[in-house]
Image (tube, grey):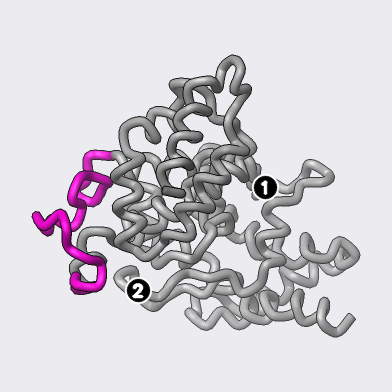
Amino acid sequence: MAVSLSIYASPICKYVDDSRQRFNPKSRRKQLLGHAADVSRGIQSTYQPILEQLLVGLSSSQKKQTLKGFRTIIGALVLLADPLPVSSLSQLLELDCDDVFYHLNNFPSVLEIPENADSNVPIKLFHLSFQEYLLANDDGTNKFYIEEKAKHVDLLRCCLRVMTGGSQFRLKNDICQLNEPGVLREEVDPGVIQQHIPQHLAYACMYWAHHLRNSQMRIRDEDEVHTFLTCYFVHWLEAMSWSWKRKEIVNTVLMLQDLVGNPESDGKEVAAFVRDARRFIFK
């Protein structure tokens, strides 16, 4: 019981203390006491008053817009396979870095937030119970609910966009611009690799298939994933190899085999592609 109480107590204490001194601790204590009757609801009674503060004084349209931003930014944050700094998260989501940083600063009691938007320190949850709260909507009353499968679809598409989009940081032939086809990974300065494969692109390469699997989508002929594989598979292999992710290449291709639609109908072409990809990487 002591462990569970510490889980609830930590965000509540941070919320009341408000180290950034934006709110009166007395008024916050009073607000929390108003939820005391709901203590039996566990994490809901812990996080709901913290999040409700985000909507105080807003009109209906402003609340709708705020909740949309919350689901876009915080929804992505809680489902990332690996924590990212503010700048990398912003690039992954294709949002303004300062806007993302400003939004995150509404939640110092539940998130470990760096001091500035340019920091390389990743944003982390203080406790996984915050994720549990956002992904649960058993009674249909959680207005901050994040629909898990739909958000994984969003993150998959963010990853595909990052890898294939118009930015200078995308998958392409000779991604590190070495102009030396036979050069070994060990002969290249790690700084050069990081310069051409920044953190948001590295994340997209590493975890797009993770988000595909958790979205419970199936790959079908000529869909966005099949198109990506057809056009960028070799470039993806190159980027992953520069990042020393050869084991992850194998795991991803094996995963894709399980995610193909019906190989006898709408997944026939992509199933053949994945079989060829598996043969290629196991040569």
Type of amino acid under label 1: Tyr
Residue assigned mark 1? 145
Name the residue nearer the viewer: 66 or 78: 78
Q: Is there any visible trace of residue 99 in the rendered image?
A: no
Q: How many marks?
A: 2
Judged left or right of residue 103, residue 41 is: right
Q: CA distance from mark 2 to mark 1?
A: 29 Å
Locate residue 5, reporting x and y percent: 82, 79
Q: At x 54% / y 30%, what residue is drawn?
A: 219
Q: Which residues are magenta?
A: 165-190
Locate residue 99, reporting x and y percent: 36, 56
Locate residue 142, reporting x and y percent: 73, 48
Locate residue 81, reporting x and y percent: 54, 59
Name the residue nearer the viewer: 178 or 7: 178
Toward the left, the furthest residue is 179
Residue assigned mark 2? 120
Of helix, strand and loop, which one carries label 1?
loop
Type of amino acid under label 2: Asn
Magenta stretch mostly in which secondary structure? loop
